[in-house]
Amino acid sequence: MAEWKQQRFEPLFSPLNFIDTDDLITPEILDTSIPSLTVPFSACIRRENGNPNRGGHYVNVIPEGSHYYISSLRRTGQSGRSQVESIIFRDRSILCGNLSALCDFINHYAGRKFSPEWHERMSDISSGNRPPGSEF
């Protein structure tokens, strides 16, 4: 497998909201970190301390009523001499039934708290909805 260099995540929605915390993501943390939970947003979940230019776990979220969809994540990077783009999630492939479920997803996805439910759902997405070069 080629080594990725200069990876870049391109958020769908501006501004990219950074959530720097060592705590589990909760509805209260999202409510204080995201300007509005009723409009689409992009967020980068990172540990509390570190270089301000570091990456993290990125999500694009589309609220729809009381539900939240995880929208496509695209990652571009350099592999050798070629520019490579991979789709990490297909558009609206993940539905979170409410804000608490969104937090559970983010905590599982970011490696903060294992969720058997999200593990199973992500495995289903991985095996049945996987474009070439994607992680899920």
Image: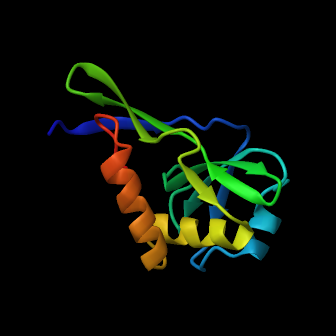
Residue 61 in the image: above or below residue 109: above
> Which residue: 57% across, 77% down?
22
x, y percent for residue 94: 55, 53
x, y percent for residue 56: 49, 56
Residue 23 in the image: above or below residue 14: below
Colour mode? rainbow
The answer to whether any part of residue 134 appears in the image is yes
Quarter residue 3 falls in? top left
- Who is closer to the viewer here, 96 or 59? 96
Quarter residue 123 falls in? bottom left
> Which residue: 64% across, 73% down?
25
x, y percent for residue 90: 49, 39
Q: Is residue 110 left or right of residue 63?
A: left
> Which residue: 35% across, 52% down?
126
- Who is closer to the viewer here, 32 or 55? 32
The answer to whether any part of residue 48 appears in the image is no
Q: Is residue 44 left or right of residue 124?
A: right
Quarter residue 72 falls in? top right
x, y percent for residue 65: 83, 54
Question: How many tags in the picture?
Answer: 0
Q: Is residue 119 left or right of residue 62?
A: left
Residue that extends furthest to the left in the rendered view of this protein: 1
Q: Is residue 121 left or right of residue 6?
A: right
> Which residue: 47% across, 64% down?
109
Q: Quadrant of the N terminus?
A: top left
- Who is closer to the viewer here, 16 or 73? 73
